[in-house]
Image: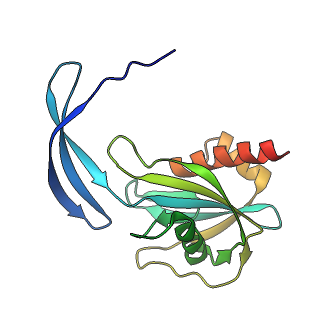
Amino acid sequence: MPIAKKEWKCVRTEPGPDLKLFTTRFDYMKNPRNDQTDKMIIIESEDSANVIALTPEKQILFVRQFRFGIRDFTVELPGGLVESGEEQAIAVQRELEEETGYTSQKWHPLGKIPSNPVFMNSFIHHWVATEAIKTSEVQWDESEDIELLLIPLEEARERLYQGFFQHPHTSNALILFFKWLDDLK
């Protein structure tokens, strides 16, 4: 069933406030349904990357950390922002080592999704690292306080389907990972 494409038109753009890790802009968008123009905020950001790091013992590395937006802890995959000019494959390797002290020589891309297409212009790239081993000490940012969790592979799958993981990037990456893993069999 084809979906009719409606053309939204950006009438004008103006800069918004700088938000430390992000910049913002306001796009004035003309709705093709009613010709009304609305001011929309867009958060501009570098892309992000996260990793499903699988140890030789078939455990997945997760990090538990406080998330300021919800003022609570989440259990999620290691990852973070890709630095300006940095390749996302390099960024995800850096983030894994910084947050967990683990590294891997075996990497596989799983794909990407929009970070939050409602108001962000960036993507998150999902990766798998197999045979991940502890090789160094963690190197956390000043605002990080991370707890490392190792969850057996099948337990992680069960927790995913039970709704345990609250971070949407983690849930999406795990869905893609378990499909990739099942397709390998």
Q: Residue at x 53, y 50 (%)?
A: 169
> For this rendering, which residue is in front, 128 or 74?
128
Residue lying furthest top: 1
Colour scheme of the rendered structure: rainbow
Q: Can residue 167 be seen in this view?
A: no
Left or right: 126 in relation to 30: right
> Which quadrant of the view contains residue 36?
top left
Residue found at x 82% / y 67%: 56
For residue 116, side relative to residue 19 (left or right) = right
Q: Residue 94 or 133: which is nearer the viewer? A: 94
Residue at horizontal 21%, vertical 52%? 25
| Residue 76 visible in the picture | yes
Count of numbered circles in the view = 0
Q: Which image quadrant: the C terminus?
A: top right
Q: Is residue 31 above or below residue 145?
A: above
Give percent across and percent down for residue 157.
72, 47
Depth check: give the residue in front, 55 or 42: 42
103 vs 183, left or right, is left
Q: Where is residue 19 in the image (x, y as percent from the top left)?
A: 25, 63
Q: Is residue 132 above or below residue 43?
A: below
Q: Where is residue 95 in the image (x, y as percent from the top left)?
A: 54, 71
The percent position of residue 83, horizontal first and vertical second, equals 42, 70
Residue sitting at 25 percent across and 30 percent down?
A: 8
Image position of 19 (left or right of 84): left
